[in-house]
Amino acid sequence: MIQNGLFDLHIRFDRLDNKKGDPLSKLNQVIDWELFRSSLESVFEKERKSNAGAKGFDKVMLFKCLILQSLYNLSDDSLEFQILDRLSFTRFLNIGIGQKVPDATTIWRFREELVGAGVVDELFKQFDSFLRENGFQAKCGQIIDASIVSAPRQRNSRDENKRIKEGNIPDDWSESKKCQKDVDARWVKKNSRNYFGYKNHISVDAKHKLIRSYAVTDAAVHDSQVFEELLDNDNTSRDIWADSAYRSENARTILKKQGYREHLQRKGCRNRKLTEWEKQGNRTRSKTRARIEHVFGVQAQKAGTLLLRTIGIIRAKVKIGLRNLAYNLDRYRVLLAVSA
């Protein structure tokens, strides 16, 4: 059996920092996680009947577990294994080698508490306020787009799907079956492919590529239906970019009334082709509009395509909200490194 030396762990961490540059260690250096403590602990303000029994895990540490899960797109069981297996994860969570590690059930229960409290949106806004107060004000206009988030496909009959769309649960479903059925997700067809799940609608500032607001809907909701909801009135510029799905007379009227300068992509049709002038306008606008694709690209590159492992839109909002918050936390780390 190999004996561990006194400084073996420090040597390994030094190699992670100096040779490879552990991004999680850098994230810990720039984020004050205590920023989220009051909101997190307010969810768990329950009087203990006695002081007997083991003390629960620190709520900020469990929150960081969910950030890890969002950054690397891990299931609860995979997250438990990776925390046990990876030194970079335990250091990020400030867990010693001999300390107890939260298991999959603990992580699931903690996230369920956040679901019930609806606190994730508050955490997202807290960090956005922190960004604005620390030199990362939303600038140079905003870009709006949406991405489909897939959910496990449901094997329902046509009659069952019809009832679900009408807002009714089939009468013959047992309680256990209802728990396994996602009646909030919807089908949508995009680029000749069918998707089942939800949509992550986001507004990104053109300067920093930080997500400033988001909304979660089922996949069948058209992008333009949440357009006004995403507008960030605190951006220093009144310019706004979006693709052709958002272009309508109603949207343009709303933007004009609120003092925005619209840069919405134009779309031709069979009876009316785009002119060369309109095509050139699209190319010019797309140079800025494409920056939002970088956000979706970074999320997919770091964590892979998000596949929800939860049931219902309430849990979907938590998972997607945490993923957007995790992106902003990591983007803040990158922006600080670039400015330095």
Image: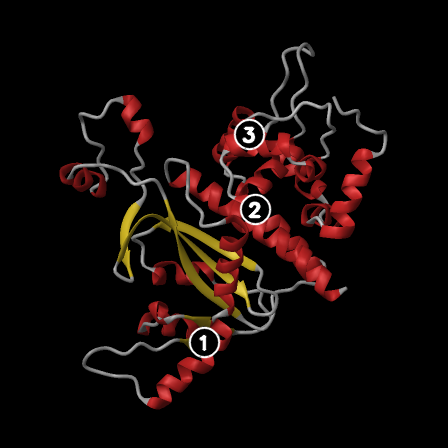
In the structure shown, which secondary structural element does the residue marked by tag 1 occupy? helix
Q: Is residue 287 visible?
A: yes
Instruction: Please name the residue shown 27% across and 56% down the image.
Output: 193
> Does label 2 or label 1 sit earlier along the sequence?
2
Q: Position of residue 68 (x, y in %)?
A: 59, 41
Q: Given the image, on which type of amino acid does mark 1 rest? A: Ser
Q: Secondary structure at mark 2?
A: helix
Residue 286: numbered disc: 1
Question: Marks 3 and 2: in contact by CB < 8 Å?
Answer: no
Mark 3 falls on what kind of element? Answer: helix
Residue sitting nearer the eye, 263 or 336:
336
Tell whether 65 sits left or right of 3: left
For disc 2, the marked residue is 71
Give the labeled residue for mark 3.
Answer: 107
For the C terminus, the image quarter is bottom right
Where residue 107 appears, x then y in whole percent? 55, 29
Badge nearest the viewer, 2 or 1: 2
